[in-house]
Image (cartoon, rainbow, N blue to C red):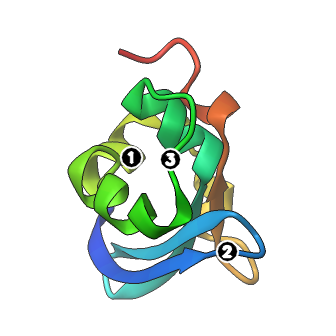
Amino acid sequence: MALERGSIRGFEHHRMVMLFSMMDGENEVPCAVSNLAMDEMDHVAWTTPDRREEQFFAMARPDRTMRHAKIPRRCIRGKPPGIILRSLDFRDQP
């Protein structure tokens, strides 16, 4: 089953990640993507914290982010389930 879009929780400044969720059927899977991964996907050197949510929606939105990342199925079904995406998860991707 493919993951579907869940909710957006916002940028967490102290961890430098954008928090969101994806749905695996009826199960919500908490997710995060690092600011470096978003910048690399967006081909920019650095995005200011006040523009992270805008960047996420414009460039690294959840459906695109999850489609391009290499996510082991065990992360989705783990205890507790959760996915943290870093820039290396997007290497060698279009």
Secondary structure under the numbered disc 3 in the rendered image: loop
Query: Residue 28 appears at what percent x and percent y?
Result: 43, 85
> Which quarter of the picture shows residue 59?
top left
Circle nearer the viewer, 2 or 1: 2
Question: Does label 2 or label 3 sit earlier along the sequence?
Answer: 2
Label 1 belongs to which residue? 65
- Residue 72 is at least partly visible in this image: no
> Which quarter of the picture shows residue 6?
bottom left
Quarter of the picture holding the N terminus: bottom left
State the residue at coordinates (61%, 70%): 77
Amino acid on which disc 3 is placed: Thr
The answer for how far apart the CA atoms under marks 2 and 3 are is 12 Å
Vertical order, 87 against 34 (above or below): above
State the residue at coordinates (45%, 75%): 20
Question: Does label 2 or label 1 sit earlier along the sequence?
Answer: 2
Mark number displayed over residue 13: 2
The answer for how far apart the CA atoms under marks 1 and 3 are is 17 Å
The answer for how far apart the CA atoms under marks 2 and 1 are is 20 Å
Mark 3, Cα crowd under 10 Å, few <14 / some 14-19 / many 20+, is some
Query: Residue 45 appears at what percent x and percent y?
Result: 56, 29
Amino acid on which disc 2 is placed: His
